[in-house]
Amino acid sequence: MQKLTGLFFLLVVLGAIAGCACPPPKSEPVAAAEQPKTEPPPAPAPAVVPAPAPAPAPNPLLSKRSIYYDFDKSVLKDEYQEIVKAHAENLAQNPSQKVTIQGNCDERGSREYNLALGQRRADSVKKALLLLGVKDGQVETVSFGKEKPRALGHNEEAWQENRRSDIVYQGE
Amino acid sequence: MTQFTRSLRFCLLVLLSLPFTAAHAQLRIEIVGSGANQIPIAIAPFKDESGLPQSITAVVAADLQRSGLFKLVDSGGLTAILVEPQQVDYALWKTRGADALAIGAVAPLPDGRYDVRFRLMDILKQQQLAGFAYQVSAQQLRATAHRIADAIYEALTGDTGMFSTRIAYVLKVGNRYELRVADADGYGPRTVLASNDSIMSPAWSPDGTRIAYVSFEHKKAIVYLQSLESGARSVIANYKGSNSAPAWSPDGRRLAVVLSKDGSSQIYLVNPDGTGLIRVSSGSAIDTEPSFSPDGQSLLFTSDRGGSPQIYRMPVSGGAAARLTFEGSYNVTPRFAPDGKSFTFLQRNGNHFSIATQDFISGQSQLLTEGTLDESPCFSPNGRVILYATNDGGRGILATVSSDGRVRQRITVEAGDVQEPAWGPLVKP
């Protein structure tokens, strides 16, 4: 089962990078840059109609699906606000799209307390999304506590990797 | 050698090899620290024991030795099998250094059962301390040996013996999880639940017939109840979010559980059939890991309402909670001692997550282990020993430490990790 989950995750990431996995905002060709004139610069040229403003490209932040935490903390750190915002905008624009936020913890300490901490990590990402206009029905939360670590070492590097919420898009 | 004899020998070899395979799946328990003053005891071979399918004195001796409180004295080289008190040569046993001697006899009964009787003799006072007789089936011989060890333990230490109890634990091999129940000496493990997803927090019903636990088989934490006899399962709690931390009230009529359905992890009471849900804790912090007092009137629990996870106590009916731990920033997993006078818990000190106990009246706490990745402490039913999970070179193992910190055991399996232990209750035979 874990292999399939990993495969899904890989596909999601690849799809997001390719810009076709999540419902993308409309993209239009960016206006071509003006060609440099080879003639000597004349008097000010007639006004050039400005190219239409390009529609927003798929937000690269949408490919980022993981938020990391300090030990025993569930607060959303500043460096992850933009990621949450990107997903919130994406979800607000696509109200039929659903996500599950999965909360995780590092291996240290109580299994039950970590289950609750993972739940609060997931729930606080959800709260942030709702505040930014996402509908309650679009976001599920689940906690795996310390039961499904991504990194298996017994050091700070592994622990940091496991103190994590993952945003998982349903249907991918 | 005829063809028949050859194939018979082959069959015997195969049969004899089977117990070894089973043994690999068993828990292996080793003493790594013994008591301060071990009681020297000799266990004399029981009369007619050698014909039995299951040795009695070997199990008795192993039980007593494994407790860390006894030193086994050489009981070999006897000229006659001892059965009656008048046969005991007290001077001989005194020379060998024994304070106590167990003697006994086994006799087959006409109905196929066995009569097993033993006496415990005080070498110094030259008198009998205890004596029992049992009529048991062949299947009950091992259990009878444990009862004899209990009787000896109780006569010589004054404490209730734990040798007839069982423990539950989770075995993890790769991505395979099994909730198992085995005898307290690790013998005879039975699988209660096998799963491709995590199982945690096993909790024995007070009468030892049922076990509650948390399973992730549906990709979230759900509390289940299972009968150990029939294997029948039911759901105790499956609400939105996480459902976990089952803890039985001492009368077995309700459980405390932790649900996140109302916005944060909070403590509720529920009937074993899932009905009658009542919220007990209040607030929006994490409140979890409830543990009932022996009188059923109060709960210990972990809460981070004060900013960091600490241990609190509150009435079962809810209401004001009193904070109990004030050292350090991480005190979790409280478990009442069976006599209600203290509790054990997990404490973080720098890089160490270690097991401690705290006395209710004095408020004094004592660190019992120096582990870095200890977790899940629980008391033995007689309150003398704490069983917990720990990590040894990257492998999950179990361990015990006596409440005075002296006697230590390591509990391992051949392959995989052992975690989430729960010591079963004392059950009347």
Image: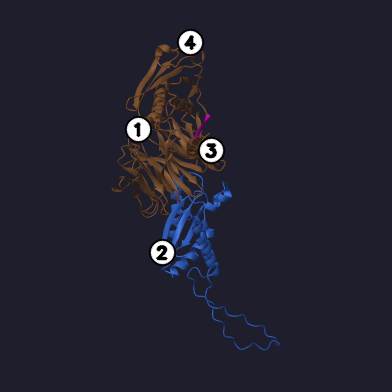
Furthest toward the left, the residue is B276
Residue under pointer 2: A138
Determine the colour of chain B: brown
Query: Outermost residue toward the front?
Result: B2
Q: Nearer the viewer, mark 4 or mark 2?
A: 4
Mark 1 or mark 4, earlier in chain: 4
Residues at marks 4 and 2, CA–CA distance in whole angstroms: 83 Å
Q: Nearer the viewer, mark 3 or mark 1?
A: 1
Task: Return the mark for residue B371.
Answer: 3
Task: From the image, tell me which residue sits under label 4.
Answer: B91
Magenta span dominant secondary structure: strand
Frontmost of labels 3 and 4 is: 4
Assign the C terminus of chain B to one quadrant of the image: top left
Q: Pinpoint residue B276: horizontal percent, then vertical percent.
A: 28, 47
Determine the CA span between mark 2 and mark 3: 43 Å
Q: CA distance from mark 3 to mark 4?
A: 46 Å
x, y (%) of residue B72? 50, 22
Looking at the rendered structure, whether the residues under marks 4 and 2 are on a common chain is answered as no
**Whole-Å distance between the Cαs marked 1 and 2?**
50 Å
For the residues labelled 3 and 1, the Cα–Cα distance comes to 32 Å
- Chain of the residue under label 2: A
